[in-house]
Amino acid sequence: MSSYEARFKVWRGDVKGGGLEDFGVEVNEGEVVLDIIHRLQATQAPDLAVRWNCKAGKCGSCSAEINGRPRLMCMTRMSVFTREETITVTPLRAFPVVRDLVTDVGFNYDKARQVPAFVPPAGVGPGEYRMMQEDVDRSQEFRKCIECFLCQDTCHVVRDHEENKPAFAGPRFLMRVAELDMHPLDSAADSGLDRKATAQDEHGLGYCNITKCCTEVCPEGIRITDNALIPLKERAVDRKYDPLVWLGSKIGRRRT
Amino acid sequence: MSVVDRQEWDVVVVGAGGAGLRAAIEARERGARTAVICKSLFGKAHTVMAEGGIAAAMGNVNSGDNWEVHFRDTMRGGKFLNQWRMAELHAREAPDRVWELETWGALFDRTKDGRISQRNFGGHEYPRLAHVGDRTGLELIRTLQQKIVSLQQEDMKETGDYESRLKVYQECTVTRVLKDGERVSGVFCYERESGRFFTLEAPSVVIATGGIGKSFKVTSNSWEYTGDGHALALLAGAPLLNMEFVQFHPTGMVWPPSVKGILVTESVRGDGGVLRNSEGKRFMFDYIPDVFKEKYAQSEEEGDRWYEDPDHNRRPPELLPRDEVARAINSEVKAGRGSPHGGVFLDVSTRMPAEVIRRRLPSMYHQFKELADVDITAEAMEVGPTCHYVMGGIAVDSDTAAARGVPGLFAAGEVAGGMHGSNRLGGNSLSDLLVFGRRAGWHAAEYAAGLTGEDTRPPVDDAQVDAAAAEALRPFSAEGPESVPASADGVTAVSQPPENPYTLHQELQQAMNDLVGIIRREAEMEQALEKLAELRVRARRAGVEGHRQFNPGWHLALDLRNMLLVSECVARAALERAESRGGHTREDHPAMERSWRRINLLCRLADPTGGLAATDPVAGQIDLVNETTRPIRPDLLALFEKEELVKYLAEEELYE
Amino acid sequence: MATGTEPHLNSGGVRTGTRAAIAAPHLRTDRWWLAPAATAAGLLAFVVYSTWRAFADTHYYAAPYVSPFYSPCLAERCGTMRAGPNADLFGSWWTLSPAIIILVFPLGFRLTCYYYRKAYYRGFWASPPACAVAEPHKKYTGETRFPLILQNIHRYFFYAALVVAGVLTYDTVLSFRDEHYAWGHMGLGTLVFLVNITLIWAYTLSCHSCRHIVGGKLKHFSKHPVRYRMWQWVGKLNARHMLLAWASLVSVALADFYVYLVASGAFDDPRFF
């Protein structure tokens, strides 16, 4: 494969406005979209704003929308497009734009703070933690998350409804709740914190209508919907809609 | 001019990677109001790139392991140039630092009996690396990030403000450490998003900015690694130590070109991967150096047996320290036995079932599949050396992490020098971040607490703030050469347009890669110093378009100053050290010299008043000083066999 | 600094407020509409077919086969099925098709199923039509309030579906008779029933609620090795939940259609032995 000139449309502007700008730019074998954006910076638009770090799909910085689909620019190879195609790159459209391809992802950091942290078990000192691999597998899958926020971007609950942002934590942070609830040594329950119930009451689990876009866009291949959100919904059902459990809690017996 | 926003803190941590966050947690827990400032988003630091694991002698997998064995391995890996006290503290404290992470929610892979699993790695005698698949760095950074959030949640409960005692200023860059006389008084920063300047006033500043890899063309490092902390310390008057030691990781991707340099974790070899040349030969058996002859397998059969029975066999030479493997690969490629794209073959596909590969090396599988269309469960990877880590760094006190000569300045992590000597073992980096990050935060908080009352807090000098602001704004008013001399034929040259910072950066990377790379020669390094002098002059004319709001061209123009300073340190120190040791290989001095073991090379700014555009390549902006180290404490020396010590230590050291 | 920005409380989506000014509701260039359109068409076809058959009240029994739509048959008006799944629980006052009584349960199970929810939210309600394609609705509250909060009762429909699947298993066993109720025979219909019941069970057991109940709710798998193994097994099925949902939907309709063909005399059930 030789190099060729590709046609790009890149959104440029800021909160006051902007639009898609046309570029013609060289593409070489094996390159990814982020390489092309860097070439634009170096040769045509030195002030083109873009966030990136590792360029290896590990840090989750270079999230953008490529031909309308939320993706990591560093993991989108140019070879998935035809040479004739015009490739459109825009910032994430669920968050306020800062400049060019950079958006204000503060929403996610606010939500992160609202999930109560891991509660260490009382009476177990550092070095005394014993956990079986099968017990940590589930939470480990969720900890693969690189916080690229593509799931938060694509989720229609907030993407299409700004007014839902205060009430809805988004897939990433509901998954965080699930991760902690499945952590074999998390002792939140002993401190009076019911993560299952708060998932629905405080983090907006009910807004999720399990249409699975979060799972579709996850660059780490985490099965967010099947392994985190639905199990969390089922756990909330245990707490709130299961008559046996309800009866059990009424007569003072708690199941764990 | 001085309408720059100012905020007061007790401790300011520059950098939010493993060391920075660990320092911030420690400082805050010891009562200091702490600010963290980082160039990227919170949680995106380069630490996430660490794959293999955290070295800590917990002895979970092989109970023969303990801190003394770890210490020995570290010293051997560093060819005895390590600050031995740092290596000792590191080996002793690493297990506690790992266990502590579990109490903050980290989930490492487990052994059968539920303890933290540990894996083999190059240069480590026992399986020692606590890990999570091959994404250990991500686990580390996320755990620390979540611990910070949990501290902020506590503060929220108590004070009604998440950021009352611990605040992260993300996407902000520090360009100067401000001083009051000798002492640190704060930092000058800009916010990337808006381009706005601000100062954080603090008596203690912890530098934890990581490395310098972005000065090289082929590197596993991200854009952040522009040597900011090294340069900040130099400019603040602190010396850098042994900057010639740059680690080239033996296995980076070599193809396709756009991903050249991206890391292929050492776990691939630790878990059974082997290196072969184009003739299919496991060439590492030809490259076992004398000092390691007794420790490594001499035949493929023995090496293969070791994976199953490590107590009765010696490890395969693929697991030699990184410097040895990188040089060996370099030699094979040079001898014409390389792979099609100029590397060698790293193969796990014939060594493990596909299922095991996907489970143990998920990100590697993903990385090759996505970026190179290579299925590592079915074919070999092509790999070659890539600039990975700088062993050199800010000279610090071993116990307190305090930078020399500048009260209030601390450094931890990759930016600090000494711990790893001339070559770092895999896995020792993450533990280094935790051990010395904690120590830096601790002593920074203690130092700040020791200054009580209004008058003892060092005031920020307005003139320094103005000077820093002017320096940061220069790229916007860059013009051609200030005075245009008439050329020889009598025609006056017309004013040139400003230099493109991207072009300058590319030229710098090419020069460092070609002239101060993995194998070094005297003439080439002199040439490099000349090139650096030329770039320095041109960098003063680096100009940018657009405005201050999130302008990457401007950011790069500012980072160039740091990269040029650090590159000169590397080149100058490499030229001075006339031997080969660890991450420093001289073609003209191929042997390790015992006499050099005791010599540290310290870089200082030649003109501390800030005349940065010194154009004379011979003088440059850096002064180099040779310094003899303190002798290794006898009880630590006693951990080694005499026969081994004679290979490293000078005669007089042995009989002291 | 990219933190601490308050959300803007104006209603609206990607084209509003402080987001990047892009007029298009989406910029996808692939055929994103294909999947929801196909889903909607498939579901619609089943709804039309099953409505016709459920209200038809005829041609649902041809010894030894009973249509899965009419099993168990619980009204007086049910045709006689010897040793078959009919019991006159409702008596003569039930004048509608007896299929209605029983179809409520599998219908409820599928309606609240986590896969079908995705399918019809996307296919019929366009909420969202596809990923990163703006939805047309002004307001969205998801499953937070009545009636959609009732989706949470899925697990009770799962319990009911277990019973229904049990009855259909019984029907399949009965299909090993011939038209004179003699045992040890098999026809093409038996095969159809076997395939159908296998898919019904696979779909029922691959249910997310089932996965939760058998083991997913546990915090420590290591203390419950048997339930852990069951959870893993259901998990494997669960990964194919969508496929099984469609396969069993088609197979149940086919099984019914087969009975219809045989009962109406349009087709003669080929007997194997």
Image (spheres, coloured by chain):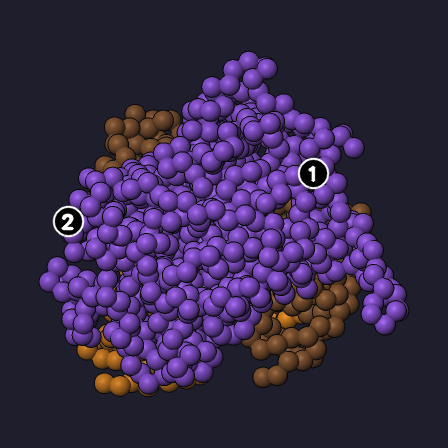
Chain colours: A brown, B purple, C orange
The local secondary structure at tag 1 comes to helix
The amino acid type, in three-letter code, at marker 2 is Gly
Do callouts 1 and 2 mark residues in contact (Cβ within 8 Å)? no
Is residue C162 positioned above or below B254 on the image? above
Foreground tag (1 vs 2): 1
Q: Position of residue C146 (x, y in %)?
A: 55, 41
* Disc on the earlier residue, 1 or 2: 2
Q: Which of C132 and B313 is in front in this view?
A: B313
Mark number displayed over residue B297: none
Residue B622 in picture, x, y percent from top left:
57, 49
> Vertically, is B455 above or below A210?
above
Quadrant of the rendered image containing residue B342:
bottom left
Q: Where is residue B207 in the image (x, y as percent from the top left)?
A: 51, 39
Give me the residue at 17% from left, 64% from top.
B294
Name which residue lies at 62% across and 33% down.
Answer: B178
For the point 25% across and 74% down, the residue is: B285
Q: Closest to the observer: C224 or A99?
A: A99
Q: Which disc number belongs to residue B64?
A: 2
Give the label on residue B468, or none.
1
The quarter of the image holding the N terminus of chain B is: top right
Visible in this render: residue C192? no
Q: Quadrant of the C terminus of chain B?
A: top left
Residue at image position (12%, 59%) is B311
Q: Which kind of residue does numbered mark 1 sit on?
A: Ala
Q: Give the Cα distance between marks 1 and 2.
A: 54 Å
Q: Can residue B333 be seen in this view?
A: yes
Residue in front for this viewpoint, B174 or B133: B174
